[in-house]
Amino acid sequence: MPQHITDDWVTSADGSVVPVDVYWLRVSQQKDGLGNAKYSHLMVVVKAALSVSHGQADVERGFALNKHITVDS
C-alpha cells in the first residue's frame, strides 16, 4: 500500500520548510518491523546525490589561481 508524506515531515514546528538534509535524515532513520533500516539502499543513492556539487565556485577558483601562476611567454 503506497504511503504519502505528511506535512509534519516537510515543515518544522514554526511552519518553515525543513531543509533537505534534515528530511533525508528522517527518512534514513525509519525502521521496518524487525528494527532494520527501512530504506538502506535508497540512502546510498541519496547520499551520493547530496554530495554532488551545486555550483562551479571551486572550479572557477582553481582557474583563477592557475591564471595567477602561469606565465605568458
Image: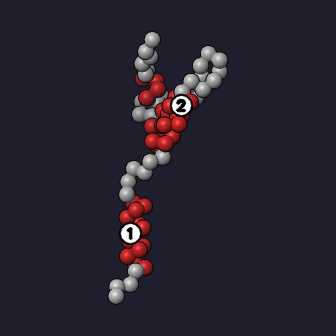
What SS does tag 1 mark?
A: helix
- Residue 6 to residue 44: above or below: above
> Please, what secondary structure does the residue beneath circle 2 have?
helix
| Residue 71: % across, % down | 38, 84
Q: Residue at x 53, y 37 (%)?
A: 44
Looking at the image, what colour scheme do you see?
secondary structure
Label 1 CA crowd tier, 10 Å (few <14, some 14–19, many 20+): few
The three-letter code of the residue at mark 1 reads Phe
Residue behind mark 2: 41
Is 28 left, or right, of 73 in this rendering? right
Q: Nearer the viewer, residue 35 or 25?
A: 35
In space, the residues marked 1 and 2 are separated at their CA atoms by: 37 Å
Q: Nearer the viewer, residue 48 or 24?
A: 48
Residue situated in front as seen by the camera: 9 or 49: 49
Q: Which residue is mark 1?
A: 63
Determine if residue 1 is in view: yes
| Residue kind at label 2, given as amino acid type | His
Q: Which mark is residue 12?
A: none
Image coords of residue 18 (percent x, y): 45, 34
Residue lying at 42% horizontally and 73% vertically, measured from the top left: 65
Please state if 63 lies on the left or on the right of 51 as rendered.
left
Q: Position of residue 36 (x, y in %)?
A: 63, 23
- Which one is closest to the eye, mark 1 or mark 2? 2
